[in-house]
Image: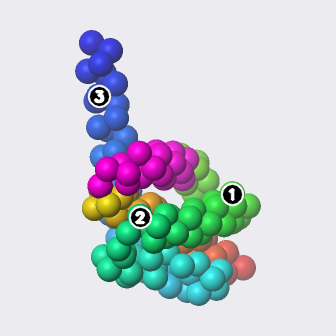
Amino acid sequence: MIAVSLGLLIYWFRYTCRLILSAKPARDYTHEVAAANELRFLEIQQDLPYVQGRRQLDDLQKTLERDYRLLSFLLGHTASLHAETDIVEQKMLMLHFNLVKTYYALVCVISQSKGRRAIQEMAGVVSHFANRMGERGAAAVVAH
């Protein structure tokens, strides 16, 4: 019973995170936020299919982690109009990013294609956070 419940919880968590990440915003701010903060996740998403070797994948993962840390800090220190729902969503995606990062560390040794997919998922979280930052900035401009 516990194993089934745990399995369903994991399924629900992954499904919810993927649903959050697949939602298309009314306006996409990722390019502006990436350029303003010198983030490289967009380059990583473009270059990922052409990367060969574990060393290059590890470099991309470290760069994504730097982008993630910066955006997490910015999101944690900016006001949000929908604070309650944003915080729950943000915490879920932060946990998702860290779980996928751990998965990457385990699976990249075995399969580079699975490592690429993990990096792609991490880049999706970073992209979502960048768009959130842009939405918050736009909302702050409108509020003033």
Task: Determine the residue positioned at 50% across, 85% down.
Answer: 31
Q: What crowding class fits label 1: few (fewer than 14 Cα within 10 Å), some (14-19), or many (20 or more)? A: few
Q: What crowding class fits label 3: few (fewer than 14 Cα within 10 Å), some (14-19), or many (20 or more)? A: few
Q: What kind of residue is marked 2?
A: Arg
Q: Nearer the viewer, residue 96 or 44?
A: 44
Span colored in magenta: 89-111
Of callouts 3 and 1, which one flags the residue occurring earlier in the amino acid sequence? 3
Would residue 29 be seen by someone viewing this image from the given angle? no
Which quadrant of the figure contains the N terminus? top left
Relative side of 70 to 48, left or right: right
Q: Nearer the viewer, residue 62 or 19?
A: 62
Residue under label 1:
76
Q: Position of residue 38 (x, y in %)?
A: 63, 83
Task: Determine the residue positioned at 49% across, 75% down.
Answer: 41
Residue under label 3:
7
Kindly report the distance in space between the C-alpha atoms of the residues bearing marks 3 and 1. 31 Å
Residue farthest top in this picture = 1
Kindly report the distance in space between the C-alpha atoms of the residues bearing marks 3 and 2. 31 Å
- Between tags 2 and 1, which lies in front? 2
Q: Which of 73 and 23 is in front in this view?
A: 73
Residue under label 2:
54
Magenta part, dominant SS: helix
Q: Are marks 3 and 2 in contact (CB under 8 Å)?
A: no
Q: Position of residue 137 (x, y in %)?
A: 63, 76
Of callouts 3 and 2, which one flags the residue occurring earlier in the amino acid sequence? 3
Q: What kind of residue is marked 3?
A: Gly
Q: What crowding class fits label 2: few (fewer than 14 Cα within 10 Å), some (14-19), or many (20 or more)? A: some
Which quadrant of the figure contains the C terminus? bottom right
